[in-house]
Amino acid sequence: MSNELTKKEQNALQKKELTASERFTNMVINEFQGNIGELNLNEYQKQLIRNYFIGIDNALKNAETSRQYSSKKKDDPTITWNNVNMNKLATDVVQNAKLGLDMSIPNHLHVVPYKNSKTNQYDLSLMPGYEGLKYIAANYSLYKVADIKVELVHENDIFQPIYKDNIEGYEFKITNPFARGNVIGGFGYIRYENEIHNKLVIMSIDELLKRKPSTASVEFWGGEKNVWENGKITGKETVKGWTNEMLYKTMVRATCKKVTVDPKKINESYVYVMESEDNYYTDAQEDKINQEIEDNANKEIIDIEAEEQESLETASTKDTNIIETQNTEGPDF
């Protein structure tokens, strides 16, 4: 009798419906193995992938809402799981999970959606935010990193580099937090456990702005833009944008690039993610999506030509539990 009960319990467990994120995780593993080969993920990495599903699912829903209200994109395909290039997404998901990037942590990892004009599908790339970049830099450093600090310096702040006993340091004081004035530059400080390796990275406002894409959107970097009415330009309006936030991430990227990487730690996932990130900025896509991704939950979808996406594609913590329900909407994996 007990054996019969055991079999019934086992059958019941086998028939138990998987959550959408569990189905997503299984799909990613199967898709990756079908294209690249055997894949071994630990339980933490699988949890990260389940977190990715929730973040990506929310991003798709928000992007679809924006598409419906956009006269330019109203004839585009619906932004749903059925119209996503799952092959590329599976590769991005696996490589970022192997690095330990967690989409549930603010500014760790973001979804970058593109409409591929060749396939008429949506390609989703996963790109590290500024906290993700610092996390990767610290984990792959040759020397043990104690902290990576980045600040923008305003004209009313006091900043002074210090070089003493062959150790780099600085003094920084915000004299008036409510009236700091305009940004005049920034600095990043890589503090190692062995202070002899400490590194101070300094950039003027001109050096930061050199990294501003030539086609930078005023929605993010600020400035003037045309006002349209009935299909005609009727004037100009000033947009404040998110200039300081854009400058800050620029400073973070420059600082993290100064961390000396341990060649013994470099692996396929590190190369894939970092080269994709570099290619993303090289292709001047930052102006189109960066702040929207970081502060507005990916509400806008990005429409680029297939050739640009192909260029992007060719580039070679904390365990957060997410509560899920069985009726979470998602793809039919």
Image (tube, rainbow, N blue to C red):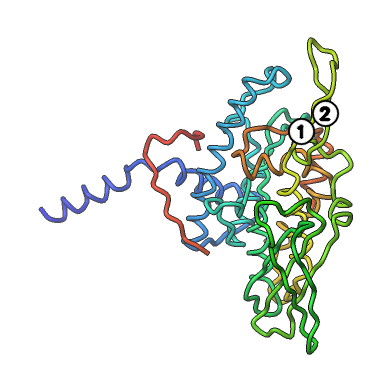
Q: Which mark is residue 239?
A: 1
Q: Position of residue 286 (x, y in %)?
A: 77, 44
Q: Secondary structure at mark 2?
A: strand
Q: Position of residue 169 (x, y in %)?
A: 75, 77
10 Å crowding of disc 2: few (<14), some (14-19), many (20+): some
Count of numbered circles on the image? 2
- The image quadrant of residue 176 is bottom right
Kind of residue at disc 2: Lys
Location of residue 70 with respect to 181 vertically, above or below: above
Q: Position of residue 140 (x, y in %)?
A: 68, 71
Residue sitting at the far left? 1
Q: Earlier in the sequence, mark 1 or mark 2?
A: 2
Is disc 1 in contact with disc 2, using a CB cutoff of under 8 Å?
yes
Kind of residue at disc 1: Val
Residue sitting at the far top? 230
| Residue corresponding to mark 2 | 225
10 Å crowding of disc 1: few (<14), some (14-19), many (20+): some
Location of residue 229 with respect to 88 vertically, above or below: above
